[in-house]
Amino acid sequence: MNPALSPAVTTPTAGSPDTEARIRELAQSLSLEQQVQLLTGADVWSTHAIPEIGLSRIVMSDGPAGVRGEDFDERHDSISLPSSSALSATWSVETARRYGQVLGQEARRKGVHAVLGPTINLHRSPLGGRHFECMSEDPRLTATIAAGYVEGVQSMGVGATPKHYIANEAETDRFTADSVVDERPLRELYLAAFEDAITEARSWLVMSSYNSINGTTASENKLLETPLSTEWGFDGVVVSDWTGVRSVEAANAHQDLEMPGPAGHWGPKLLAAINAGKVSREAILEKVTRILRLAARVGSLEGFTPAVTTPPAELNGAAVAREVATRGAVLVRNQGILPLDSTQLTSVAVIGHNADEARTQGGGSATVMPKHTVSPLEGLRKGLPDGVQVTYSRGAKVAEGLQAFPRTAIHNPVSNVPGIRVTFLDANGAVISGEDRLATHLIWFGIGIPEGAATIRMETDWTAESSGIHHLGIGTVGQISFALNGEEVFNSELEDDTDVLGAALFDPPKTVHAIQAAAGEVVRIEAEYQLPKQQVIPFTAILLGEETVVEDPQAEIDAAVASAKAADVAVVVVGTNAAIESEGFDRKNLDLPGHQNELVAAVAAANPRTVVVVNSGSPVLMPWLDDVSAVLLGWFGGQEFGHAIADILMGNEEPGGRLPTTWPAALEDVPVLNTTPVDGKVVYSEGIHVGYRAWLKQQAEGGAAPALPFGFGLGYTTIELGKAHAPQCVPAGKDVMVHVPVKNTGTRTGREVVQVYLARKDSSVERPVRWLAGYAGTHLAPAGTDSVEVRIPAKAFAHYDGGWQFEPGTFTLLVGRHSADDFQELEIELR
């Protein structure tokens, strides 16, 4: 654990046998019925309370990049941090720690005791739907960033929950797929990504995944015991992914808590199994003890001192969001145009759908409701001097389907306030209650709909921002009526034609209707939704909004080209959206949606001073990469995304990021691609060669190279690496320190990330061409120097063969800036 956090953290189990004994006695004092009840959630987000022993409920919340709380209510707003791929691109454990601390602060503010994150599955394939939510393709980078995140969250007295354990790298058939992984890659890659969060940061929870691993579903898998509990010493709670417990058999594994509740596969069935001798009482007692231990740590158990009594000083969440977006942005091309010199600018053409409607977070359980988001267009308008003219052209449609109405465009006609009026009616049409909402994407998951409600009525006045034909609609699953200006235009059932759980949240079936409206004209929108009589999980989502319909795509590109020709600089923002990158499904390809590639090509041809900002959570193909002046990868940049982009383009901040994953030039070049099970199995046939390791193996065999290598990133200054130093001989099982002198030879303050890889020639075992062993960053003023110390953990030299083995002999230390660099080489003897 980070020593800086240690004074505020006191772990009840460490050095406190009395505390442990009292917790176990308390667990034993419960009746068997109470014990079993405690092992399944009380509802969607919390555990059962047992007041007679002073136990209050433990509240859990999504998500990895913001804390939503127990509801999806936009009135209960959350800080929206950049996605995990952006966080990992910082290559900074300290930044990850601050990121985690903000999540911990948010959790405390919302009454949440455990954050369901970080998501630390590896980027095995760039097609993975939750690629944006995970950190990296490399286990070492993932493990260190994840540990910093966990430390930050838990410094606030809130539990962190590394997920999804284990081998859960794809979304296709995610509930039933069997990940077939040999023991060596399982240990060296997929488990290694989790290890530091458990052994170093001492995470208080772990979430088991939906998938099976080598034939056994995760919640029943022996991997929950070994290595998690035995070798790594995990003493926290293993919580299931929601509905991830499939049978009573999970109680014989080290699965501790079934979510959600109150109905599930345990409860009465588990009680019967215990009484029949099929599940031991000792196993149940151990699970209850772990849950009470967690309760004590987070302050939900009276009579016990919480793990943290004095949290660190509060951080400014918006400032951290902006910092992470800046530090994680990766500059991958710059032909001298950046940073822009505002004194030489008279006009800037901002182009792209994502410039105005930026995608700041991925879809699915990671979704939170921020109070505001800053688009690149807004950020540039605020960041550029008043004398610089900023024009905007959409150029090419990106956002598919309905998009929620902007909050500034809706007015509640019932309460005469901004927003929308929502009214709950009983089966007889009588009003139960009503509420004034601020947004038109309405989601209820577990709570929020009053008992006895049969109908939800929605009313708002929408103001058209421009003249023309507007396509207004509503999306949901179920019976819905929809009226515009008092005329009913739809009254029927919308059916979910997917098999993706929760698809209605991300891309619901919809009905859309065209209406002519002048700029400033008000349209009354009314809808009534009939609630289903029965739901397995109480989940309702309704989206009112507008769909972008482009009749002539070329005309949009032509308009953007005209604006680019008239400007000193063109900034084109391209990207994806939640219909492409989301929980629940994998990507079909890596193409930018719509006509965005044609847009970039046309703009670059019209104005040689074209800068492209990529707003995606994971790799996309960039066929125009060599034809534009600069390319900045901004990821899903959180609520302050636009400010960060403006800061970087204007030179107020350094683009600090390095690629956490390899970016290909063509889909067919990607060495590990498939995410679709065959006969129910996803076979990890590539073994230990994942990510850049697979690319290097492919290149060694004469295959294609990527467009951008792992670890790559440019800055605004020049930094020189001096001669590295490391011991020439080291005993097996010992860490190694590599010292690298670094000097800023440029004219600006800048950042460097020194990366150290290992290689082994003539090895007796199969190895990657090279593998990341350690890294460290430094910030330097002009002419500034530093001696960067990079720790290489002992296990970086080891391979797994029934246990961790060290092959004696010569390893090569490779010191550089990215995985394909012209390295300094040092030999080190392992004995």
Image: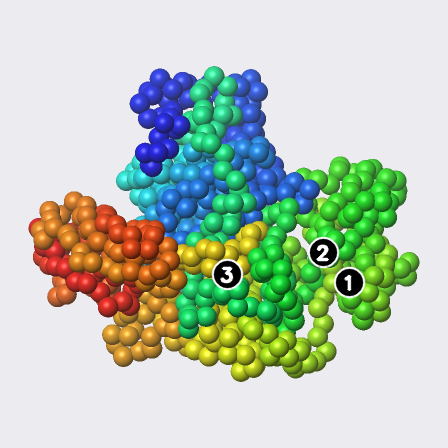
Q: Is residue 694 visible?
A: yes
- Which one is closest to the eye, mark 1 or mark 2? 1
For residue 465, the mark is: 1
Please state which amino acid type lies under the numbered disc 2.
Answer: Pro
Q: Tags 3 and 2 in contact by the CB under 8 Å rule?
A: no
* Point 43% across, 35% down: residue: 154
Q: Which of 345 and 729 is in front in this view?
A: 345
- Image quadrant in which the N terminus is located: top left
User: Tag 2's secondary structure?
Assistant: loop
* Between marks 3 and 2 in the image, the one whose residue lies nearer the viewer: 3
**Circle 1 — which element?**
loop
Q: Do the residues labelled 1 and 2 touch (CB within 8 Å)?
A: yes
Residue hosting label 2: 406
What residue is disc 3 on? Answer: 650
Q: Earlier in the sequence, mark 1 or mark 3?
A: 1
* Amino acid tagged 1: Glu
Say which label, 3 or 2, has the lower sequence index.
Answer: 2
Q: Is residue 343 above or below residue 319?
A: below
Counting from the top left corner in percent of width and height, residue 392 is at 65, 68
Eyeballing the image, is 807 above or below 394? above
Q: Is residue 374 toward the left or the right of residue 630 in the image?
A: right
Q: Nearer the viewer, residue 23 or 265?
A: 23
